[in-house]
Structure formats: structure tokens, C-alpha cells
Image (cartoon, rainbow, N blue to C red):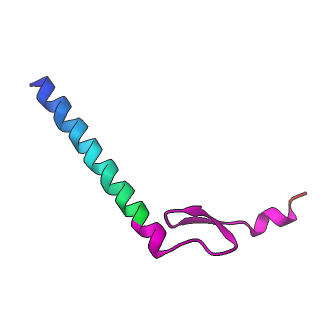
Amino acid sequence: MAGFINRLVARTVLVCAALAALAAMQNHHNEPCTGEQVGAAGMCVSTTWAGGAR
């Protein structure tokens, strides 16, 4: 029974990871970062603050 549960958990984790990767790829294509941003998969961060740091 423990082996069955281990396989079930492993498969569930793999399926969730695959779905997350597909969602990130889709979001990256639908909402790319603009010129003043860096990031991936729609998770962009502004870089304007970096110019004033000395």
C-alpha cells in the first residue's frame, strides 16, 4: 500500500509540475515584459530603480 501511495504522489507532482510549466509558457507568450522590465512567464520586475542606485 505504501508503494501505491508513493507512486500516486510522484505522478501527481509530475502532472502538477508539467501543468505549471505549460501555464508559465502560455503566460510568457501572452504577456511578455516591456522594455523597462525583466522577468519571465508574466512575472516582470521594473528596472527603473536600478538607474538611480550608486
Report x, y in % for residue 45.
63, 64
Q: Is residue 15 magenta?
A: no
Q: Which residues are magenta?
A: 26-52
Q: Outermost residue, right direction?
A: 54
Instruction: Locate the N terminus and report the quarter of the image it occupies.
Output: top left
Corner quadrant of residue 14: top left
Q: Is residue 34 left or right of residue 32?
A: right
Does 21 sit above or below residue 51? above
Residue under the image location 84 percent in, 65 percent down: 51
Vertical side of 28 occupied by 1: above or below: above
Q: Nearer the viewer, residue 14 or 9?
A: 14
Instruction: Give how far across and how far down residue 7 sits, in percent.
Output: 18, 33
Q: Quadrant of the C terminus?
A: bottom right
Instruction: Please give left or right for residue 32 compared with residue 37 in the image.
Output: left
Q: Residue at image x 48%, y 67%?
A: 28
- On whether residue 42 falls in the magenta region, the answer is yes
Question: Measuring 42% from the left and 61% from the top, which residue is drawn there?
Answer: 24
Q: Looking at the picture, does residue 14 appear above or below residue 43?
A: above
Q: Based on the displayed image, in which of its 4 quarters is residue 44 positioned?
A: bottom right
> Looking at the image, which residue sits at the far top?
2
Residue at the far left in the pictured view: 1
Percent coordinates x, y for residue 26 in the rendering: 40, 68
Q: How many marks?
A: 0
Left or right of residue 33: residue 15? left
In x, y percent, where is residue 10? 24, 36
Q: Which residue appears at 22% of the width and 37% of the height? A: 9
